[in-house]
Image (spheres, rainbow, N blue to C red):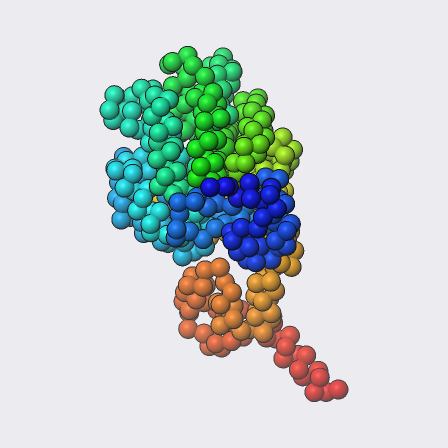
Amino acid sequence: MTTQMEEAKKGNLTEEMKIIAEEEDVSPEKLRRRIAEGTVIITRNVKRENVHPIGIGEGLRTKVNTNIGTSLDVCDLNLELEKARVAVKYGTDTLMDLSTAGDLDEIRRRIIKEVNVPIGTVPIYQAGIEASRKNGSIIDMTEDQIFNIIEKHAKDGVDFMTVHCGITMQIVNHIAKHQRLMGIVSRGGTFLAAWMLHHEKENPLYQNYEYLLEIAKEYDVVLSLGDALRPGCIFDATDWPQIQELLTVGELVEKAREANVQTMVEGPGHLPLDHIEANVQLEKSICKGAPFYVLGPIVTEIAPGYDHIVAAVGAAIAGMAGADFICYLTPAEHLGLPNIEDVKEGVIAARIAAHAADIVKLGSKASQLDLEMAKARASLDWKAQFNVAIDPEKAKEIWGRTKHRDPSTCSMCSRFCAIKILKEALKTRAQCL
């Protein structure tokens, strides 16, 4: 079985490439070249049958990911399946299962079966959790267990997986001597850092990277090279550990491309506004244009309960600067496991940010719906406005809260509507001429 990258390098157009080229309104040949170069990836495990392939990267629409998954405090598979359905309903492009409680294999397989969007996972979670269940601690996981679980996820049909290959002993030792304010906030990164410190051994995902590439190539799984050292607050932004990990990841991207394995690169985290563009440019330069997958970024620390908005601010700037893939945040970020309404709000906030960025990146190709909305507003056509709204249900609910004296207007201005007054004045003027 050959990978999408391998086929692209041979000059072949796969069915997935044709689908994406048509949906994105790009030249199939241009898309093929970008896949061959590694600046575009296709998330499609060869084992998945019910998945719609997604293209992520240069010249394509900015995509949105939704995280779901159980925790020790809230472990309800049916709830997570409903979150998956809601996320897809409101337009997520992909889902990640980050479950840490319950039957992890069953949860992952049920989610994969439930939806037709690409699915991602973080296999190191399961490796650490199973070691903890069996032996009492995450540091008791073995290298064989880590890679066996990675292969299990690939066999199950996972389309992309986060692997923290760039956190090395050099970086962990540096942090031990020069501690950051928030240390390591990546759960997977912390699992590996604790393992490395205990065993005094190199990160097995870095040490055995060639073996990881073999697994990924067999199933054409996209490796999402995780940012274990992402800043957990704006005061750790763009520091030595973060950049050192990115430099290592840049080397790993090159090795993956040589092996015909698709990769993308995960990015920060918490960043002040004036760091965002530089961080995107750094990733694009160091990683030779590899698709960039960002969490937010989160641009202020003081808004628990509203971090979906905080992240959307950062994501719009990151997307405009060239980030390709946005991971949503919900109002529950930093506070607890999101409920269904949190998931909906998070997806919509991230989609707004992605779309705002695409208006700049893709121009009229992205702004067609905005033009339709502007025309509908100009003509006071409420039905047309609802049809193109990102959340028609909420728009209709707000508009319908008040009984309108004039149904052609809203309750904000009513008969003093600027558009209506101007139309009537122009009509009167025309009749006088």
Residue 152 visible in rendering: yes
In the displayed structure image, the side of residue 201 where residue 246 appears, left or right: right
User: Horizontal and vertical percent for residue 220?
Assistant: 47, 40
Say which residue appears at 49% left-offset and 72% top-offset.
Answer: 383
User: Horizontal and vertical percent for residue 333?
Assistant: 41, 39
Numbered-mark total: 0
Give whichever of 180, 195 is nearer the camera: 195
Q: Quadrant of residue 291?
A: top right
In the figure, 362 relative to 403: above or below?
above
User: Horizontal and vertical percent for residue 335?
Assistant: 37, 37
Say which residue appears at 48% left-offset and 67% top-offset.
Answer: 386
In the figure, 231 relative to 340: above or below?
above
Say which residue appears at 35% left-offset and 35% top-offset.
Answer: 152
Q: Quadrant of residue 130?
A: top left
Give whichever of 112, 94 is nearer the camera: 112
Say which residue appears at 46% left-offset and 23% top-offset.
Answer: 208
User: Horizontal and vertical percent for residue 282?
Assistant: 63, 32
Q: Quadrant of the C terminus?
A: bottom right
In the figure, 288 relative to 388: above or below?
above
